[in-house]
Image (cartoon, rainbow, N blue to C red):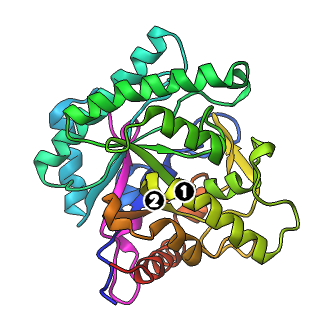
Amino acid sequence: MEKSSLKLHNAMWPGLVGKGDDDGQEPPIGLEQMLDLTADAEVNGQKFDGVDCFLFLPHIDPAGGDDELRRVADLIQGKGFSVGSLVAPVWPGTVGDSAMGDAEQRGKFLGAVELACRMARVFNEQGVRKYGLIRIDSAEFGVEKWRENPKANTKQIAETFKEAARIAADHGERLAAEGEICWAGMHSWKDMLDLLEEVGMPETVGFQADLAHTYLYLLGYNAPEHALVKEGYSEEEFWAAYEQMTDKLRPWTIDFHVAQNDGEVHGAGSHDKTGKHCPADDPNGKLDIVKCASYWLKDYESRGIEHICWDGCMFPNATLEEAKTWNTILETMIAVRDTQEA
């Protein structure tokens, strides 16, 4: 078997998501510290190849201009990393707004995608980025408003995504919509599939699968009618359901996050009611990470996937700052990579 060529990346946004200055929150961890924690990880001579980044403060200033982006590129390259996928700041309170909203809100969403593509261009020109995607979602938090008129609201999100796709294509980029139960119109495997098919632009808009979030798809947490397993499921039932889900979404999957989940919903700060990321070796983890990943990564090269990324949001800072955390994650990433056929 030819060794997989997949690059191993670490996400930088776990230093930001759920962090802040409100009561009960921990302060964000800066980009350079996250890079150093990633750079220090090593397993049998293997290190992380790169990082995926969130294009917003405090890590990256979207209003900082090209010179600021070049400084960030130099910082990342100086740590020995490439840049892969980039998270566009599409949410209210960043640059964008709801893809399901009115004309002004949708305009902000599209502006955030345009901005992300321009920022990606600077990284590309600096040579720090040679692969990866622009990550988006509906930026409509919660499913209550969507449920008022599911068909019309899915169509509205799809129209916004189509416009975003045209922007991305003009910049030579692709968009990956992250399946996560907190985002309206993307909150179950079936609704996610319906949205992708409504957009109907697989050459530009695909799916970004996260092991933790898609496990809650399986459980039907925000869409019980789409649950594929029931509480107390057997191992045989799990794998049959997992194959059913991945067979539907894998053809659309163009970006992949390795993660663990204990079956719980978790949140912090403004990012609430989403799949709980767990440490790779969490004893309560429900997923055989390596085996689950193989379902998503089958024939990965045909879908243009060149790297995989670890995502572990809303860990306590003490966990993020512990060297063992990253060595265990890297070991898991290596195992995922080495079980894939190139």
As drawn, the residue found furthest toward the top would be 103
Marks 1 and 2 in Cβ contact (< 8 Å) = yes
Q: Is residue 56 magenta?
A: yes
Residue drawn at x 73%, y 64% is 262
Give, as a three-letter code, the residue at label 1. Asp
Confirm whether the magenta stretch covers residue 317: no
> Between 326 and 108, which is closer to the camera in this rendering?
108
Q: Which residue is mark 1?
A: 210
Q: Residue at x 57, y 77 (%)?
A: 291
Instruction: Residue at 34%, 64% (x, y): give it.
Output: 307
Q: Above or below — where is 11 with respect to 49? A: above
**On the picture, is 250 further left or further right than 305?**
right
- Assign a secondary structure to mark 2: strand
Total marks shown come to 2
Q: From the top left corner, tell me how far across and down residue 325 is, in percent.
A: 54, 72
**Residue ID for mark 2:** 256
Residue 244 shows in the view: yes
Image quadrant occupied by the C terminus: bottom left
Q: Secondary structure at mark 1?
A: strand
- Estimate how packed mark 2 is, as few (under 14), some (14 to 19) or many (20 or more) residues with alpha carbons within 10 Å: many
Q: Which residues are magenta?
A: 37-61
